[in-house]
Image (cartoon, grey):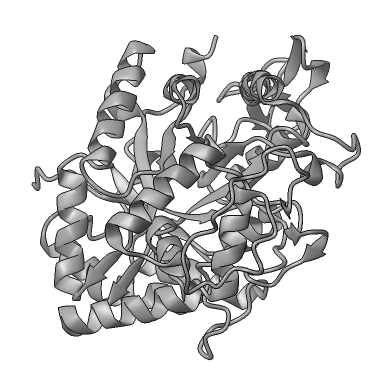
Amino acid sequence: MSTRKQIILGAYLGGVNHHTAWWDERAGSQIDFSTFEHTARTAERGKFDFFFLAEGLALRERAGQVFDQDIVGRPDTLPVLASIAAVTTHLGLAGTINATFNEPYELARQFASLDHLSGGRAAWNVVTSFDAFTGQNFRRGGFLDRAQRYERAEEFIATVRELWDSWDEGDLVADKETGTFLRRSDAGSFRHAGPQFDIHGRFTVPRSPQGRPVLLQAGVSPQGRDFAAANADAIFSPYGQLPEAADFYRDVKARVVAAGRSADDVKILPSAGFVIGDTAAEAREKYEEVRRGQVTGQTALILLEQVWNRDLSAYDPEGPLPDVEPDADAPQIIQGKAFTFQDRFETVAKWRQVAETKNLNLRELVIDQFERGPFVGTASEIAAQIDDFVQNDGSDGLIIGSHLVPWGLDDFVDQVVPLLQERGSLRADYTGSTLRNNLGLPAVRSTELV
């Protein structure tokens, strides 16, 4: 039996971002069911653990106008995952749903239902809202500040778990001879009273195959890492390269142990792209072509405008970086796009230094700084790169996405997956009946929930 760490693989279907090459003549629709179906079937053919969908709750705008530098339009996550459940057998179904604009009872029912319909393959990626612009689309017409949305998210998760745990494994008897349907009359009863939610009643969905659907989360700040270490089954890592990825891995695993869990109870999973060539030189040439297609001059300016918060359209993308400072107090020029930079001024200062050191113009700087950390090379080289990254504790696996939807994942499954299996780093077939089993996560039993 192989002693190598088994690589977890998730399949990511790109949507609202500039990485998706919608302009490529080979690209398909972003919203047709056939796109989701092909990607999911391909992932299952490659023995991927799960299929992952992000969330888009608002169309992005620049200065009040929807812009088409990235993909516009994204269907609702849960109907897509439910439809994929019908055309796959083993593939996990991970959906991103916001904890700011939803209610615990509603969300708990949806994921418990998906877990039943799929035979134990549901996973919830917990996120919170980041701006008032997105909040305008919802009934409360606003959003919560950073501290409040984390408080709500923490109580939201606890409440959802209370609802999932309101049914025990043996509550549904359905004994036709005795006429007994429920083992106990109070199955599904719940009462939660807290600062964010005060609800009580009966939860309508009996205990699902996984007990609790798998919980995914992202967390980079110390507070976010602690919260994810205490609550999540898998954490998205923003680090796709060693050694910073290994530093994050060690830190989060230590926090998991400090939270009273086993280090292996939480999986670390960064996202990654790939470009395959018949030779290393061909792969590098294809990669450079893809990157320049993804980051056009206009896209480069828009990506920088998010940090500068200024109209930069007068600047030459092939020229130097803007010579003005960010305008932190002006209304947001880019709306609906998550701002992931901690400090505008520090970011700009760093980028200017990078541009000077590497002799990069504006567009080249964007290409350099907005890289997702792809694996580039022949299939053999990519298999070796991925294996080395995981075996050296850069992560427990990867969430793989392609710039070409829906056909890009085929190359990875046909060429790289067999090589990882030959190395003994990727299983030849599914070993469990649920997503939790396949990820190597501990079972959640009702007797532990009292």
State the image coordinates of residue 368 (x, y, percent, origin top left).
37, 61
Which residue is rendered at x = 72% and y = 36% of the image?
Answer: 107
Relative to the observer, which residue lies in front, 357 or 124?
357
Which residue is rendered at x = 63% and y = 71% of the image?
Answer: 69
Residue 428's image quarter?
bottom left
Relative to the observer, which residue lies in front, 52 or 357?
357
Asked if one can make out residue 342 in the rendered structure from this viewpoint, the answer is: yes
Asked if one can make out residue 15 in the rendered structure from this viewpoint, the answer is: no
State the image coordinates of residue 274 (x, y, percent, origin top left).
33, 68
Q: Is residue 62 left or right of residue 445?
A: right
Toward the bottom, the furthest residue is: 25
Residue 101's image quarter?
top right
Q: Is residue 38 left or right of residue 415?
A: right
State the image coordinates of residue 307 (x, y, percent, origin top left).
58, 48
Q: Is residue 23 left or right of residue 399?
A: right
Residue 280's image quarter?
bottom left
Toward the front, the furthest residue is: 323
Q: How many marks?
A: 0
Q: Is residue 238 above or below residue 279?
A: above
Q: Is residue 58 above or below residue 125?
A: below
State the image coordinates of residue 223 (x, y, percent, origin top left).
49, 20
Which residue is rendered at x = 86% and y = 42% of the image?
Answer: 138
Which residue is rendered at x = 72% and y = 28% of the image?
Answer: 181
Q: Is residue 65 above or below residue 224?
A: below
Which quarter of the image is occupied by the C terminus? top right
